[in-house]
Amino acid sequence: MADETPAVELRDVTKRFRSPDGSVYTALRDLSMTVAPGEFCAVVGPTGCGKSTTLSLVSGLEPASAGTVHIDGVPVTGIDPRVGFMFQSDAVFPWKSVLANVAAGPLFRGRPRKAVLGEAREWVRRVGLAGFEEHLPHQLSGGMRKRVALAQTLINEPRILLMDEPFAALDAQTRQIMSDELLRLWELTRPSVIFVTHDLEEAIALADKVVVLTVGPATVKGEYRVDLPRPRRVQEIRFEPRFVALYERIWQALRDEVKLAYARTAKAVAA
Amino acid sequence: MSAVTLETTAAAPARTRVRVRRRRLVVRTSQLALVVAFIGGWELAVRAKLIDEFTYGRPSMVVAQLKTWIFDGTEVGSLGAQIWVTLEETLIGFAIGVSLGVVLGVALGRIPFLADVFDPFIKVMNSIPRIVLGSIFVLWFGLGLLSKVVLVVVLVFFAVFFNAFQGAREVDRNLIANARILGASPRKVTWQVVVPSAMTWIIASLHIAFGFALIGAIVGEFIGAQHGLGLLINEARGAFNPNGVYAAMLIIAVVALAAEWLIALLERRLLRWRPSQLPSSPDI
Ligand SMILES: Nc1ncnc2c1ncn2[C@@H]1O[C@H](COP(=O)(O)OP(=O)(O)OP(=O)(O)O)[C@@H](O)[C@H]1O
Ligand SMILES: [Mg+2]
């Protein structure tokens, strides 16, 4: 492993926030993890533990309070053009058409308009939205908007792809279709992925490695290699014995944290 | 909207349409009746000497006044020229005021440092009854176009500025983060994310701002001018001619309605991306 620099490396990262009441809240404490080039890494953990925070540190949107974040061995000091980020909540531009939304990234980066529009058309087709180029986001379903966001992110050909519960708001069927689509598109360019999810099944079905975070302040509780063969079909892989065994093992680790998080919020409500 | 409902109610739309049209006709007729009753009542009351013509005027004389202005011109030149002078002051002041309001509002909304620095000054400026500044501006800038334009700019600026500022601050942080990740420079974030987002707020303020612009121009002319609708009102008042005041008011109302219509058109054009408040297909 010595010859391979990790695509993403978090080294003893701590992140503190000042809460509105002035006190300091520690969201991440001494968190260390790595993602190899081309690796699909899923991150699971109880709600509010600091998963989104971890992604915002990798993206360069937020600085770490202590510790370092490296991309290809170079410390992150700001937003890196190699990073793509699909946000937890809808972030497509509501005043831009589907095509303009998908074309936004390369145009922001100053590429010539004509070439970009051709490329954007191609990406719109790839995510299954051909014929909807001129639609506005509010005229699309939630699942279609997620596809726009996916195309918008992938058109920049990120080497590091951060995804924050991208499919959480979708129904189970759409989510499976989107997952398969994501894997297919990921195979095309093979970026390193950090995929945050609440859904352990989704995590195992998609990833090469599942990282379990502890209840906040988050740190890594365990890392689990998923050695299921690719290419995978998300709806079928769930029934394989090896999948089930992995699920059992990881769930053991995750369950305790989820219970802790739940007890904590229950106490906060009671207080 | 399934095929079934369409089939079972195939005859209904025609009937509904007839009912809708009839209702609209009734509403319009009632409105017309109200206007006729009000103006007719006024005219009759004056003729029957129930109210004093020299204090309250008389509708038929208002029409006569309009006719005189249109065909013989006013004491200070043709009517068209007076309307044009007022419109010119209004439009120039409006354009400058809106531009300044949008630019400064968005800048202060985007740059917290500037917002902190300017905050007390803006609060003080805003608490001054600005219409009073008209008298000062006539002293400073004379009886011509400039003093009115400056007054209009001041009135319009504040109306637009606060909305642009608020709009720039309320921009969804996710959209900004997304644009930055996608590769937008701060300048592109401002122009392609903040300004379009704030547009809803800015356009909402334009309706009020245009009203202020017209008020500013007319009050400015009122205070001191050689031309314009405000001057006509002032002269009519001085000559104890209420009909002249009404006639000028009528002209101003027409101008304001036309402007309102244009702004609504602009609004529909610029804010097409918003889900419309009205159902796109008529419900049955
Ligand atoms: N800007 C901020 N200011 C203050 N506290 C914050 C801020 N951002 C996040 N936090 C806190 O940090 C903790 C972690 O937040 P984060 O959004 O990373 O959680 P998460 O794991 O993504 O949760 P979820 O699964 O519900 O999305 C939360 O307790 C949150 O209240
Ligand atoms: Mg989150």
Image (cartoon, rainbow, N blue to C red):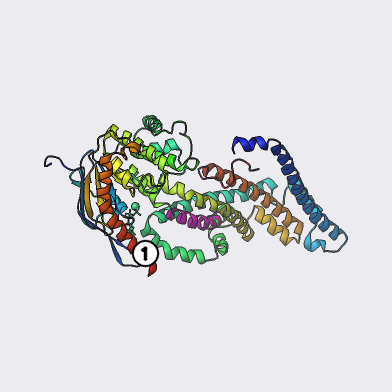
- Residue type beneath disc 1: Ala
**What secondary structure is found at the residue carrying circle 1?**
helix
Any atom of ligand 1 within 8 Å of the CB at mark 1? no
Quadrant of the rendered image containing residue A40: top left
Q: Is A270 located above or below residue A169 in the figure?
A: below
- At x 37%, y 37%, the residue is A151
Per the image, is A2 magenta?
no
| Residue A83 in view | no
Q: Which residue is mark 1?
A: A266
Q: Is residue B29 left or right of residue A89?
A: right
Quadrant containing the N terminus of chain B is top right
Q: How many marks?
A: 1
- At x 68%, y 49%, the residue is B254
| Residue B88 in view | yes
Quadrant containing the C terminus of chain B is top right
- At x 22%, y 53%, the residue is A220
Region in magenta: B149-169
Horizontal and vertical percent for residue B46? Answer: 84, 60
Q: Is A33 located above or below residue A237 in the figure?
A: below
- At x 75%, y 47%, the residue is B28
Q: Is residue B168 left or right of residue B9?
A: left
Please tell me whether the stretch drawn in magenta is mainly helix, strand or loop.
helix
